[in-house]
Image (tube, rainbow, N blue to C red):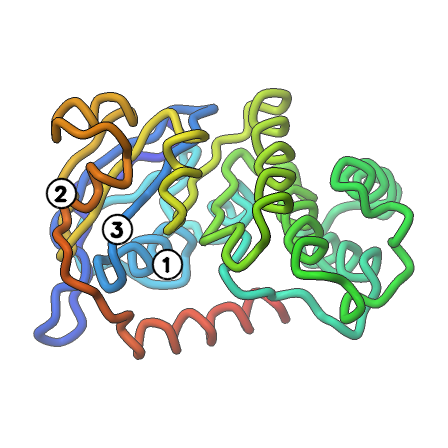
Amino acid sequence: MIIQIKNLSKKFNDLTAVDDISFSVNKGDVFAFLGPNGAGKTTTIKMLTTLLRPTAGNIILDGHDPTKDANSARHSFGIVFQDSSLDDELTAVENMELHGVLYGIPQEVLEERTRQLLEIVELWGRRKEQVKNFSGGMKRRLEIARGLLHHPKILFLDEPTLGLDPQTRNRIWLYIKNLNQKEKTTVFFTTHYLDEAERNANRIAIIDGGKIIIQGTPDELKKETGTKSLEDAFIRLTGYRIREENSSNADQMRNHRRIFKH
């Protein structure tokens, strides 16, 4: 198991945002972590990626405990946030170089990896352009390349294709699945596009009210709920009520993105 979560909880005063959850992810899995707004997804990801300390429970990422050895844990994963954390005033190459310096990658290794990754995401020809001139899809591809620069074992993707057109969404998932298959990179992602989860994930966990309510393959979840699609299964499990995102959690996540950016 490359990710092991046992009895993980997080409380904010009287609010229990994550309530005694346990799950694991095998090396090389594409794992979807799904839930309505306010279900506990963001809080869980923040704990897994060293941005928030758990109230209780245990986390192991590639053999490292993020609460005891945050630096080693950070080197084991890359992360692509829902909102862009790129520096728009820098070029594509400069964004990659800055990330490489932060992770202590030697210059000769950094140059080669930058070239390889920008070629994979088809941005090598645009490497000297400022990111502010990039489309949303190009920025997403650059962030994925940057997240893989230090050769992480795990790639966390928070809504990686939010707001992108169907063609760009498909292109990005082709890159992600190709990297997963070739490099055996474990992918842990959240999405509200349930067709993406059904098509790409081999394992799924659904969280609601801070608790894991079901885990399994897409087919197992559909069989358990007697539905024909993952979207129907998701709604049957979580209900029809519209959820609002917790504004304080959203503000905290934006602040943490600024820390990773700089």
Cα–Cα span, label 3 and label 2: 12 Å
* N-terminal-most mark, 1 or 2: 1
Frontmost of labels 1 and 2 is 2
Dots 1, 2 in contact, CB < 8 A: no
Tally of numbered discs: 3
Q: Label 3, on which residue?
A: 35
Residue 236: mark in rendering: 2
User: Could you tell which of marks 1 and 3 lies nearer the N-terminus?
Assistant: 3
Check the image and report above or below for 152 versus 253.
above
| Kind of residue sitting beneath label 3 | Gly
> Is residue 262 or residue 157 the one in the foreground?
157
How far apart in space, not on screen, are marks 1 and 3 (Cα)? 15 Å
- Nearest-to-viewer mark from 1 and 3: 3
Instruction: For mark 1, give the secondary structure.
Output: helix
Placement of the C terminus among the 4 image quadrants: bottom right
The answer to the question of whether label 1 and label 3 lie on touching residues, with beta carbons closer than 8 A, is no
Disc 1/disc 2 C-alpha distance (Å):
27 Å
Type of residue at label 1?
Lys
Residue drawn at x 13%, y 76% is 13
Residue plotted at (25% across, 56% down): 36
Numbered tag placed on residue 46 in the rendering:
1
Nearer to me, 222 or 111: 222
**Percent position (x, y) of residue 182?**
63, 21
Query: Helix or strand or loop: what does disc 3 sit on?
Result: loop
Tell which tag, 3 or 2, sits nearer the viewer: 2
- Assign the N terminus to one quadrant of the image: top left
Percent x, y of residue 71: 51, 52
